[in-house]
Image: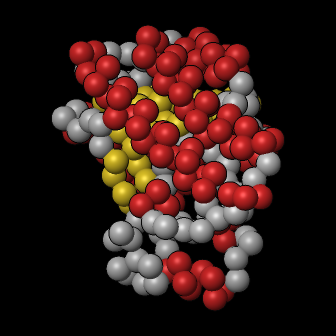
Amino acid sequence: MNASLTGKVARVAGGSRGIGRAMVERLARDGAAVAINYASQAAAAEKLVGEITAAGGKAFAIQADVGRVAEVIRLFDKTIAHFGKLDILVNNAGIMFVKPVSAVTEAEFDRIFDINVKGTFFACQQAATRLAGGGRIINLSSSTTTRMMPNYGAYVATKGAVEQLTRSLAGELGSRGITVNVVSPGPTETELFTADKTPEQLQKFAQMSSFGRIGRPPEIAEVVAFLASDAAGWVTGQNIRVNGGIC
């Protein structure tokens, strides 16, 4: 175990599987106590808690819909009540659909903005006053915001909002030594990403990168762990694109 985050407390939204799970595993391995927020994957979250505690770490799982402000506040209340403080906030919860702008319904628009933007915004609002001094906020965006990808309009609109929120908040919280950054993965090998794609489609995504493959969750988690550490104390307001060179 790397002791670089020993004594720190992290909360990871969307932490039960995929990239979020890799983040939780890495932060715990670096010594952080981790609150794992999940929406519906209770069994996966509890299994991860068991694995971390069996390895000598500290973790617990909290169910919440981050699209509801009251639930976001409850997440902070329960995390701080359980661990005594919060040092690291990772806003990884998100949903995505691929659909022409002309076909997006009001209900679909509201839901994707509730989870991807509202959830992140109000978590950051809570963190602005409740995160420990010298803390870390790490928001998740997507490398799709730099590409002209048809049918991603609603999704990239939410991620563009997260990127601009991050830049503004970095300026607000610098006086408390809190850094605020964005990590923007490219196509990454998760169950959710690969489930509805043909081998041909996956190969097309792989060829977008300089390495001819899609990313792996631990590769994203490595960058999150760096941003959460003391080594990243002079890095704030940045968008780090962890995508194998996709422009």
State the image coordinates of residue 41 (x, y, percent, origin top left): 77, 44
Colour mapping used in the image = secondary structure
Q: Is residue 219 above or below residue 88?
A: below
Q: Within the image, what quadrant is residue 219 found in?
A: bottom left
State the image coordinates of residue 180 (x, y, percent, origin top left): 35, 32
Q: Is residue 180 above or below residue 239?
A: above
Residue positioned most to the bottom: 200
**Between residues 130 and 175, which one lies in front from this camera angle?**
175
Residue positioned most to the left: 234
Residue positioned most to the front: 102
Q: Is residue 65 left or right of residue 78?
A: right
**Between residues 126 and 172, which one lies in front from this camera angle?**
172
Identify the residue shown where x is 61% and y is 52%: 155
Identify the residue shown where x is 55% and y is 48%: 157
Q: Is residue 95 left or right of residue 92?
A: right
Q: Within the image, what quadrant is residue 174 found in?
A: top left
**Between residues 46 and 177, which one lies in front from this camera angle?**
177
Q: Is residue 76 left or right of residue 245?
A: right
Q: Is residue 194 above or below residue 218?
A: below
Residue 114, visible in the rendered structure = yes
**Quadrant containing the C terminus in the rendered view:** bottom left
**Quadrant containing the N terminus in the rendered view:** top left
Q: How many marks?
A: 0
Identify the residue shown where x is 24% and y is 15%: 175
Identify the residue shown where x is 52% and y is 16%: 126
State the image coordinates of residue 149 (x, y, percent, origin top left): 54, 68
State the image coordinates of residue 71 (x, y, percent, origin top left): 70, 21
Q: Is residue 243 above or below residue 54?
A: below
